[in-house]
Amino acid sequence: GIRYIPVDRIMQRLEELIETYDVGFVAIVDENFGTDRKWLTEFCEKIKRYDVLWHVAGMRVNCITPEFVAMMRDAGCTSILYGMETGSERMLKIMEKKVELQDNYDALKWTVDAGLFSVVQLVIGMPGESPEKE
């Protein structure tokens, strides 16, 4: 299972960083950021109050919608990185990603269309991968 840090605890830590170090940008690195939509909504509502910019590395492509991208951008998010891993439907199955290739395309399109930065993160040389086009 996944254990989420309560949003209020994160905001308390953010307040301390802002007061102590005048932080204006926060990098969030989490393998499953935003998988709980209620948590993500609360997070966006509360971080917006601090007027900081932030970035996410580790959001799943099947947990995002254009509405959530817009909500995150409105709350100060500047970029979302996804662990897409591959552009091959067959390799997604071998990797047991439990997503469709279209999920990769959609997440990236919605992110870029919203004016956010992203990077395509790929795994190269995965066992079972071949140079032939699938």
Image (cartoon, rainbow, N blue to C red):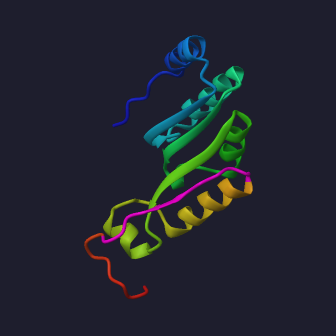
Furthest residue toward front: 21
- Within the image, what quadrant is residue 49 found in? top right
Q: Is residue 93 left or right of residue 36?
A: left
Q: Residue at x 66, y 27 (%)?
A: 52
Rendered residue at 36%/69% (across/down): 124
Residue 15's x, y, as percent?
58, 14
In the rendered view, does 50 fall on the left or right side of 30? right
Stretch of the chain drawn in magenta: 114-125
Image: 13 above or below 53: above
Where residue 112 appears, as percent x and y from the top left, is 68, 57
- Residue at far left of view: 127
From the viewer's side, name the closer residue of 26 and 47: 26
Type of secondary structure dominating the magenta stretch? loop
The quadrant the C terminus occupies is bottom left
User: Which residue shows up at 53% across the image and 40% down it?
Assistant: 34
Q: Is residue 100 magenta?
A: no
Q: To which quarter of the image does residue 109 belong?
A: bottom right
Left/right placement of residue 53 relative to residue 131 reads right
Query: Residue 70 at x, y = what percent?
Result: 72, 44
Above or below, 68 against 52 in this view is below
Vertical placement of 102 versus 43: above or below?
Answer: below
- In the rendered view, would you say 47 is above or below 94? above
Task: Identify the residue at horizontal 38%, vertical 75% (top origin).
Answer: 90
Q: Which of 39 and 132 lies nearest the eye of the viewer? A: 132
| Number of numbered discs | 0
Front one among 8 and 26: 26
In the picture, which quadrant includes the N terminus? Answer: top left
Residue 23 lies, in percent from the top left, at 59, 22
Q: Is residue 131 left or right of residue 64?
A: left
